[in-house]
Amino acid sequence: MAKTRNTKQKAAVLAAVKRAKHHPDAKWVYEQVSREIPNISLGTVYRALASLSAEGLIREYRQADGPALYDPNIDDHLHIHCSVCGRIEDVPPVEIPQDVLESVRRASAFAKVDRVHLEFHGLCSACAAETAT
Amino acid sequence: MAKTRNTKQKAAVLAAVKRAKHHPDAKWVYEQVSREIPNISLGTVYRALASLSAEGLIREYRQADGPALYDPNIDDHLHIHCSVCGRIEDVPPVEIPQDVLESVRRASAFAKVDRVHLEFHGLCSACAAETAT
DNA sequence: ATGATAATAGTAATCGTAACTAATAAGGGC
DNA sequence: GCCCTTATTAGTTACGATTACTATTATCAT
């Protein structure tokens, strides 16, 4: 909610993430934006990514292993990771039933359960085709 | 499956994790084991933790943010994180129905879905009591 | 016991990210 | 359009977690 200024750096970072066909990390974004603004600082990219995420224009996806990824798709969705090549695809959201959440809450003696992190892992079709040979 | 040797370092690391009442990280284990083996190397702790995890004697829990945690409980279970204090509790496993997994598989055009990472976030009772005041 | 070699201590290196600081540039008011 | 305040930047250093490297030590099959 703080008044944030429009800089060409931030605009370029946003544009780079939005045109990404995958889930880029900060390094990829830095390389992209560097073509346009050769002396941009890596720190600026990190700051822009954080602020764009906070503003809800992109989504930060903190994977368990490896760097944070940034997602041009801000609609509610989940991810599936290929355990061979690391490829990540979007999938529609999956709801955990309320009664299941309630049983988790009771088992843990927590006051409430307000967020569920759900991610899928599998084998993408490309890797499946390769392993088959 | 490689022949692994029994060293007092590895035994001490295993014992430290097993007696932990929480989900310790490598640093905590290092501090614990250092009392027993003062000149143990941090690298040795990391190596022992990795090898014990590979042998299935403990479980590695790679959280999205912060260091990897190690779990003395090797039974199938999940975790719930308090978003205020970071406390982590074990909870019983929750199954995702096969038809849901199948729809995820179809949506992603993956060949198969073989693993689901599921973690809960909420407010633990201690933090709830504190916020209430 | 002894020899091959896995594991160790100690250290340096790597990776992703955050923090710092002086210089720059948005953008609101005139 | 021109200031002026101050957010943002470039450039750099620092940091935490982890891995890699290397010479030395210690396990364990023979």
Image (cartoon, coloured by chain):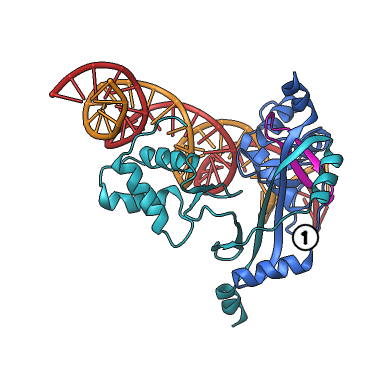
Chain colours: A blue, B cyan, C red, D orange
User: Amino acid type of disc 1?
Assistant: Ile
The residue nearer to you, when weighing A110 against A23, is A110
Q: Which image quadrant for residue C28?
A: bottom right
Image quadrant where one finds the N terminus of chain A: bottom right
Residue A65: x percent and y percent?
60, 40
Residue pictured at 66% horizontal, 28% vertical: A39
- Indicate whether residue B88 is drawn in magenta: no
Work out whether B12 lies above or below B22: above
Work out whether A10 lies above or below A97: above
| Chain of the residue that carries numbered disc 1 in the rendered image | A
**Can residue A8 be seen here?**
no
* Residue receiving disc 1: A96
Report the side of B63 relative to A116 (left or right): left
Report the side of B14 relative to B38 (left or right): right
- The residue stretch that appears in magenta: A75-92
Residue pictured at 77% horizontal, 37% vertical: B112
Report the side of C7 relative to A48 (left or right): left
Q: How many marks?
A: 1
